[in-house]
Image: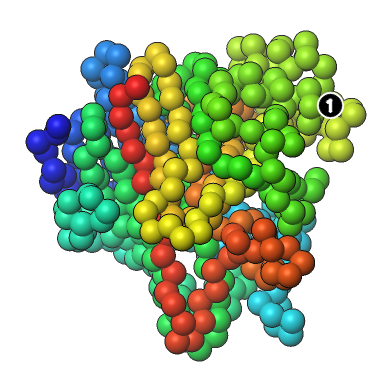
Amino acid sequence: KLFVAMSVVEELPSVKASDGVTIQVFKLSLNGVTATVCSVGAAIHELMVPNFAEGKAEDIVLGYKSPADLHESKNPPYLCVVVGRVANRIAKGKLTLDETTSFDLATNNGPNHLHGGNEGFSSKVWDAAIVDVPEFQGHPSTKGVKFTLLSDDGDQGYPGKVEVSATYSLAPTSSAAALCLQMEGKLLNDTPSPLALAQHSYFNLGGHDNAKGVLEHKVTMPSEGYTPVDTTLIPTRHVTKLESDPVMDWRKGKIVREALIAFATEKAGLEEQEAIAHVDAPARVGSTMAVTGEKCATPGEPYGFDHNYTIDRENKKELSIAGIVEHSETKRRMVVATDAPGVQLYTANYLDGTNAEISKNGMAYGQWQALCLETQTYPSSVLVDEKEHPEFAKGKCFILRPGGESYTHRVEYRFESM
């Protein structure tokens, strides 16, 4: 049993960006886990976790050399930030709240709206303070860092004035600590607004600069269904049971390399030898990225997993396991637990090696260098006909309404030894 129950939280010297913006930086430490978070996008700037095989700690999230680089680059891949006002995609940028009310949002991802638009919550500088964090389901009360953001009516085309917060804290696990994130939101005027936040960290349990990417990671997800998508990654609003689609099924655990080979041959229109050559390539950046074959509906596109999986939340108060990631070489295990109805598994298919000069250690982060487990409501689910799509409606986007409930969403990244 661990004897340290109270994490240490300190504010580090702030960072000044080239445009004069001041970025606050904080460090949370407990049982060998150290998280550095900053006020740009309420981001996890660094996450040091013990290497249980060798004892040293290593940074397991992709990111930038400095919070200033995060801010100045506009962070096109959304590395390690909180995204919103609505995470994931909204089809064709059409936000429809009811049969008579719709809004046009920016289409910043092909024909669709993604992660709140061109200047969503992930690119804003949030207010920040060290706060007391109450106990939660067995975690002791502790200190944490609370980031707060005000978003006006009309911000990025969204209706409603909202205030959101993201509070990070650490809690002890059997062999290290869990990084806990409590996200909340409330409406400040009388105009309803959708709200769906997600933490978009890119994890590599072998270290952010691991030369093998995440190909040797084992991923297990208890989800029994996933939401298939069209050629622009918008859900069809059906839920496919995983026993009928074994390539997408992670319930028994899979090594990412093998899963990508199966995906390539079954979903991406490639021959097995091509798929093996892709995973065995020394790098997948720029022109060497792995892309789909001519038989695929979207030929020539980078491929991999970028799908929403269902989480059964009926009658549950405690958190559900969204996924377990394991790296045998370092004996690190990360258990992702949440109260969200869905989780997006993304294998960093579109990382192309750009921005190496401002990345940590000058790393050219390429395809499959990391994976995201983004806990969320389902993509493009603001208005769902519950009679027509009853299974998909279980994960529909939360709407803040005057006099209605406030928004809450919790995710925990629990680190332990295998």
Q: Nearer the viewer, residue 221 or 295?
A: 221
Residue located at (73% from left, 35% from top):
245
Q: Residue furthest right?
A: 295
Seen in the picture, residue 25 relative to 315 is either above or below; the reply is above
Would residue 119 be visible to someone looking at this image? no
Seen in the picture, residue 248 relative to 82 is either above or below; the reply is above
The picture quadrant where one finds residue 51 is top left
The picture quadrant where one finds residue 95 is bottom right
| Location of residue 341 in the rendering, given as x and y in whole percent from the top left corner | 53, 55
In the rendered structure, the answer to whether residue 70 lies left or right of residue 4 reads: right
Q: For mark 1, does the 10 Å Cα neighbourhood hold few (<14), some (14 to 19), or many (20 or more) residues?
A: some
Q: Nearer the viewer, residue 290 or 259?
A: 259
Residue located at (74% from left, 54% from top):
238
Residue located at (67% from left, 38% from top):
242
| Location of residue 103 in the rendering, given as x and y in whole percent from the top left corner | 69, 76
| Location of residue 214 in the rendering, given as x and y in whole percent from the top left corner | 52, 23
Seen in the picture, residue 237 relative to 36 is either above or below; the reply is below
The picture quadrant where one finds residue 324 is top left
Would residue 141 be visible to someone looking at this image? yes
Residue located at (30% from left, 29% from top):
416
In the rendered structure, the answer to whether residue 268 lies left or right of residue 338 reads: right
Q: Which residue is mark 1?
A: 269
Q: Residue furthest front?
A: 315
Q: Quadrant of the C terminus?
A: top left
Q: How many marks?
A: 1
Q: Quadrant of the N terminus?
A: top left
Q: Nearer the viewer, residue 273 or 259?
A: 259
Q: Nearer the viewer, residue 293 or 36?
A: 293
Circle 1: element type = loop
Type of amino acid under label 1 = Gly
| Location of residue 272 in the rendering, given as x and y in whole percent from the top left corner | 78, 14
User: What colour scheme has been applied to the protein in the rendered image?
Assistant: rainbow
